[in-house]
Each structure stands twice: as structure tokens, then as C-alpha cells.
Image (cartoon, rainbow, N blue to C red):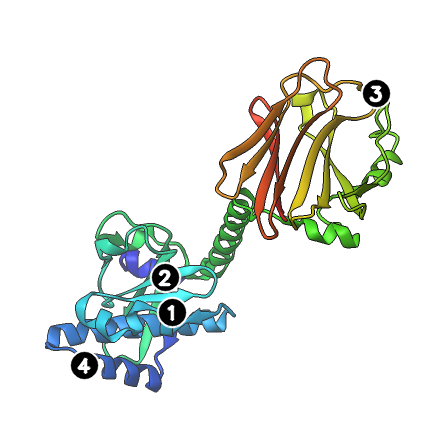
Amino acid sequence: MSRFAYERENFSLSLPISQSARTTAQIFAKQQPTSEKAEKVLLNTLSVLTVNYYLDLMGVATNLDVSDSWNPVMRLCTDVSDLEVVGIGRLECRPINTVGDSCYIPAETWGERVAYIVVAIDETLLEAQLLGFSTSVETEELTLNQLQPIEELPAYLEQYKQAKKKITQDIKQKIQIPVVVNLSNWFAGTLANGWQTIESILSQPEFRPLYLFRSTELALTNRDGETMTATRCGKIIDLGIQIANQPVILVVEINTQENHKTNVRLQLHPTGTQIYLQSRVTLTVLDESGNVFLEAQSRSADNYIQLQFSGNSGERFSVKVGLDDASISEHFVI
């Protein structure tokens, strides 16, 4: 008994080929222009359906319809034998005859598949053997002694799925869609994303500065003597060791002007026992395109820095607090 025959007896899995699988494969084969191409499509299709049947038994979801091997144009123009596994990727299901000791893998599939599965199709087309799988291929000839047992395929697919999920999560964390704060909601007292009233911040001893802010709401009057209200809210900004582990308070004050524009005043204050901001802390306003609109930088004796501007309803801007290479940005719409 040859080594390959021994390995097949111990590691392969025999599965019946159903009548419906044979019918589908024969329909696909009859659509081909030559007998050679028809034979290739017949075996490719049976290989895919055999792997699909096995994965169905193992509770692994697949989608034949989106596989290239189920696309008539791709079947006609290329040597396709792929199977889409839901949430994971594509498998390459390659057929060999029952006496072969290696399997042909088209170069265009290298590096494009989650795994490569070798399927031996019986000459009667009544039975197929899943001989094993490989997770990577670098040559056109994949020898059978390179294969892992087919019984390990479901566990490998689950591990691959979890690893792919983690990579996706990491990418999402690095490319987070910024939260945009709608300043008009503040007039109604609706705050979100870590913003607090000034009174709430001052009630926390670890953040309460040595000097006090003015009232949360400031009463203003216009030229006609009408009263306007300015609302102030704040957020704790922590740049960690960059500011000696001492957070700062970003204060945003807004009020509506006579011309229906909104006046915005930004202030940056130290917290706790700190009287002054650390020098070189920057407070920057960027427009919707990311261009610097206004900027202020603290000096050694500044207990706060501020910027002021006005904008129309619907205008967007960002505020960046930074020191050296560290920075945190907040995004707003008026």
C-alpha cells in the first residue's frame, strides 16, 4: 500500500454525490464549448458541491450564488472552483482523480483563498473523498502530504473568522467616525458625548480650579435692550503625561446674535490645584475643510486662553487641544 493511499484511508472523508449535484454539474458542463472544458467544469462543480455539503453538515454557512463558480461567464472564461463561506471568505475546491498524488492550483487563486481543499472524485461520479486542506499555496502543484486533515477545517474557519473580526474591529477603532456635537441642542439643555454644565464640573473637587467661573448662563442685552442668554458647557480634556497628568477644561460658550448668527467663545482652563496652564498648550479652531481658522497658545503665566468667532446655522467646525505631538479634537455644528 502506498503512503498516499495510507493517508487517504486515515485522513480522508468519503461523501456520497447526490443526484441533484450530478444534475447541476452536468447542466453547467453542457454550457461549455468543448468537451475538455465541459469535463473540467463538471469536476469543479462536483468538488464545490461536495465541500458545500460537508460544511452544511458541520453547520458552516455558505453562499453558492455569490461564488465565481456559480457565474456562467466566469465558468466559461476561467478555471473557477470556489465556494463563498459567509463572513469568512472563499475556499478553493480543487478536484483530482482517485490515483493522483498532487493537485493543480491555478496561480490566480494564490493568496486569494481562505483555504484550498482537495477533492477526489470517483470515476462513477457517485462518491467523493475530501482528502484535506491547505491554508496557503505557492506553487501550481499541491502535493497530498502537505494537506491537513479535513476534520480540522471547521475549527480553522472559526479561528480565521475570529481573527478577521478582531482585525476589522481594530481598523474601526483607528478610523472612527467623529461624533459631531449640535450646539443648538444646548439651548434646550440637551448635552451629550461627555459635555457637562459648568456647575457640574465645578462640583467635582478633582477638577475644580482655584478660581471660579462665572454663572453657567450669562444674561446679555442687545442694542434694543432685549435680553439674550449665553450658555456655557465644558468638557474635561486629558492629554495624559503630555500635560503632567493634569487635565484641562474646554469651555464652549454660545449665544445668538441680532443677525441670527451664533457667537462662539472657547476657553481652556487648568484644573485642580493648577493656577496656570502648562506653556505651549494650543487651542485651535479648524473649518469644515480642516484648515486652521483661529489658534491660541498658552504662555507660562496664562491661567486660561480663549478664542472667539461667529457662524451661521449649519456651519461645522472642529476644536483641537494639543501639546507637542499629542492632541484631542472635538467636532461641532452650529
Give the percent coordinates (x, y) of residue 63.
Answer: 41, 71
Asked whether, in this view, residue 128 is left or right of residue 188, the answer is left
- Give the labeled residue for mark 4: 31
Q: Residues within 10 Å of mark 1 (few under 14, many from 20)?
A: many
Q: Nearer the viewer, mark 4 or mark 3?
A: 3
Q: CA distance from mark 4 to mark 3?
A: 82 Å
- SS under mark 3: loop
Q: Secondary structure at mark 4?
A: loop
Q: Nearer the viewer, mark 1 or mark 4?
A: 4
Nearest the eye: 323 or 163: 323
Q: Position of residue 249 (x, y in %)?
A: 74, 31
Amino acid at the residue labelled 4? Gln
Q: Residue 23 occupies which quadrant of the picture?
A: bottom left
Labels 1 and 4: the sequence-earlier one: 4
Give the residue at mark 3: 273
Say the numbered circle drawn on residue 51. 1
From this viewpoint, which residue is outermost toward the front? Answer: 224
* Residue 214 percent location from the top left of the image: 85, 33
The kind of secondary structure element at disc 1 is: helix
What element does badge 2 sit on? strand
| Circle 1/circle 2 CB separation < 8 Å | yes
Residue 142 to residue 245: above or below: below
Inter-mark Cα distance, 1 to 4: 23 Å
Identity of the amino acid at label 3?
Thr
Residue bearing mark 2? 91
Marks 1 and 2 sit apart, C-alpha to C-alpha, by 9 Å
Q: Is residue 162 left or right of residue 137?
A: right
